[in-house]
């Protein structure tokens, strides 16, 4: 009879996935409807509060467009309208209850939005200041709450999946695919890489900015090595605890010894080295690298090596011991090692997409050659006004590239090899999610008498404390798995456990954010 560990491993093995439409529904729809309703209900709640404490709070909010002090009512509402549908839609209750919940939120949000548009006396005097849609746009180059929401959405979706996958309530089609196909959990690692690339130092660097000198390059390298050291330590700790506690593991995910923390370390160091090389600051390098990698996969049987080879070297030639150990390590961890190439391409592409779609970049022809002091601000406003067009066009082009690879070239999506189809699917999905979240903020900003829309408190806290909360979520997942027989848990109890776990993470993020960042939570929202 198999052990519980073997049963759990078999539970997540040999799966084929679902389709892109359902994954898009699960990942984007609850966030879109939840954020829309949250903005409108927050407006309604703040407009009805007349006491001096809230008035003072609103003045700070109007002035800074930042993050409020924690408010129990709004935090509870955030958990209900955002976290609950996010968890519900990753369970067997997606049809019909998840869809009903999303449609109800969307309908209520649109009704409240229409009501707010018609009732100009709806807002309190503090909110009746001149807060036009343009004022939102003017501040978004510094404060981009929609980007905070996107990055936190990636985190919360991942938090749910890594725990829910061990319960029967989590549909097997959402788990990671074994070879090819579309699995909701296949997007987790890639989405984190995209999220980091959009806000990297290279993405935010202005085009007209002087290239770093040799001394500056050395400082960049030292800085990234220091940032990577904790990831290596965490990766080693995870490896030792997983092996020591006999914790279930999906070997075809990254390999026998590899894990996502090692992948993040590799990407962080190598991407910095690449960007410090002159002429590697465009799309040509990642496109060339991905093309060469796909050629290896398709024409030199590298895809077969990743999917079918044993976990040890099987060459007939005699090898020396060090070479044999090195060969065995590569065979045992081929998914993690080879997958780093695909994830590196995702990171480099997302950096360029971030520069094009999100961050204001002044070229020398636009600002440096003109003497008008107001020219940079004018260029910024023109850039901001075209952000929606850039986001929509970028998302559409990425989906076209994905369809070209999968339908015309017949390259199936492979999470194990992170091939070209997987890379463009990951980029297209994440840019689409970012676009929808952007539009929720634009809809909320149309109510001129409302306070400036910004990210929910539980989202802002997770965004600022991302790595700490990710580690905490993994620890909580491990504790629950070691203390609970998830295989025998009923669906109702499983959903309850997932919601308690998710709310615990949100409260923990607020707690850490309050004590780590201190007064920073009262001023302008920062993006890590």
Image (cartoon, grey):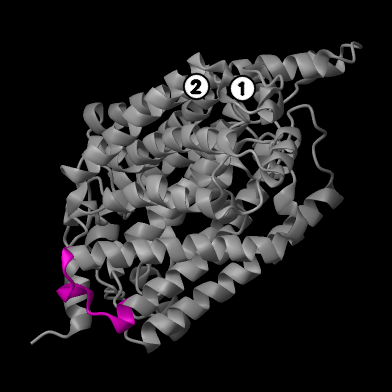
Residue 510 percent location from the top left of the image? 58, 60
Q: Is residue 374 above or below residue 309?
A: above
Q: What residue span does the magenta drawing correspond to?
A: 481-491
Residue bearing mark 1: 449
Crowding at dot 1, Cα within 10 Å, few <14 / some 14-19 / many 20+, comes out as many
Classify the position of the N terminus by image quarter: bottom left
Side (left or right) of 288 relative to 180: right
* Crowd band around label 2 with a 10 angstrom C-alpha radius: few (<14), some (14–19), many (20+): many
Dot 1 or dot 2, earlier in sequence: 2
At 39% from the left edge and 50% from the top edge, which residue is drawn? 80
Residue 245 occupies quadrant: bottom left
Whether residue 484 appears in magenta in the rendering, the answer is yes
- The x, y position of residue 462, in whole percent, is 55, 55
Query: Where residue 119 is drawn, which disc sits there?
Result: none
- The magenta stretch spans residue 66: no
The percent position of residue 215, horizontal first and vertical second, equals 86, 51
In the displayed structure, 375 sits above or below 245; it is: above
Query: How far apart in space, not on screen, are marks 1 and 2 (Cα)?
Result: 9 Å
Write down the residue under mark 2: 116
Residue shown at 46% from the left, 48% from the top = 78
Does the rendering let one see residue 92? yes
Q: Please, what secondary structure does the residue beneath circle 1 have? A: loop
Residue pictured at 38% horizontal, 71% vertical: 477
């Amino acid at each position: 009879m198999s052990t519980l560990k073997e049963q759990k491993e078999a539970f997540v093995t040999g799966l084929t996935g679902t389709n892109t439409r359902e994954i898009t529904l699960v990942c984007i729809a609850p966030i879109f409807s939840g954020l829309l309703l949250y903005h409108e209900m927050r407006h309604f709640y703040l407009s009805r509060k007349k006491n001096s404490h809230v008035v003072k709070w609103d003045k700070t909010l109007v002035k800074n467009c930042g993050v409020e002090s924690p408010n129990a009512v709004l935090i509870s509402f955030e958990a209900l309208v955002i976290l609950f549908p996010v968890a519900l839609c990753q369970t067997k209750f997606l049809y019909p209850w998840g869809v009903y919940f999303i449609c109800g939120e969307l309908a209520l949000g649109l009704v409240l939005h229409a009501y707010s548009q018609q009732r100009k006396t709806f807002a309190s005097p503090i909110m009746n200041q001149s807060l036009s849609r343009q004022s939102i746009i003017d501040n978004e180059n510094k404060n981009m709450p929609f980007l905070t929401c996107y990055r936190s959405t990636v985190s919360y979706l991942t938090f749910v999946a890594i725990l829910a996958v061990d319960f029967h309530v989590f549909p097997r089609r959402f788990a990671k695919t074994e070879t090819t196909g579309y699995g909701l959990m296949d997007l987790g690692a890639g989405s984190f890489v995209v999220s980091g690339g959009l806000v990297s130092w290279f993405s935010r660097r202005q085009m007209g900015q002087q290239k770093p000198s040799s001394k500056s390059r050395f400082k960049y390298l030292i800085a990234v090595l220091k940032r990577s050291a904790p990831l290596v330590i965490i990766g080693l700790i995870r490896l030792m605890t997983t092996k020591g506690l006999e914790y279930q593991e999906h070997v075809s995910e990254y390999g026998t010894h590899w894990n996502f923390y090692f992948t993040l370390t590799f990407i962080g160091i190598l991407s910095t080295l690449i960007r410090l090389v002159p002429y590697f600051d465009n799309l040509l390098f990642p496109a060339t690298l991905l093309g060469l990698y796909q050629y290896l996969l398709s024409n030199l049987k590298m895809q077969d090596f990743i999917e079918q080879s044993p976990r040890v070297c099987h060459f007939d030639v005699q090898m020396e011991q060090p070479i044999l150990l090195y060969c065995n390590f590569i065979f045992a961890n081929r998914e993690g090692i080879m997958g780093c190439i695909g994830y590196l391409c995702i990171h480099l592409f997302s950096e360029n997409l971030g520069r094009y779609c999100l961050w204001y970049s002044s070229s020398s022809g636009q600002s440096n050659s003109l003497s008008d002091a107001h020219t940079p601000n004018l260029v910024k406003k023109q850039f901001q006004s075209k952000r929606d067009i850039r986001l929509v066009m970028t998302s559409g082009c990425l989906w076209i590239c994905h369809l070209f690879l999968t339908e015309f070239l017949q390259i199936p999506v492979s999470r194990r090899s992170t091939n070209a189809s997987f890379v463009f699917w990951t980029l297209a999905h994440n840019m689409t999610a970012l676009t929808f979240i952007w539009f929720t903020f634009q809809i909320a900003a149309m109510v001129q008498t409302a306070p400036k829309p910004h990210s929910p408190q539980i989202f802002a806290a997770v965004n600022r404390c991302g790595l700490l909360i990710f580690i905490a979520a993994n620890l909580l997942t491990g504790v629950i798995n070691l203390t609970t027989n998830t295989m025998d848990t009923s669906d109702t109890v499983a959903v309850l456990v997932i919601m308690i776990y998710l709310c615990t993470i949100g409260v923990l993020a607020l707690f850490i954010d309050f004590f780590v960042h201190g007064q920073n939570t009262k001023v302008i929202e920062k993006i890590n």
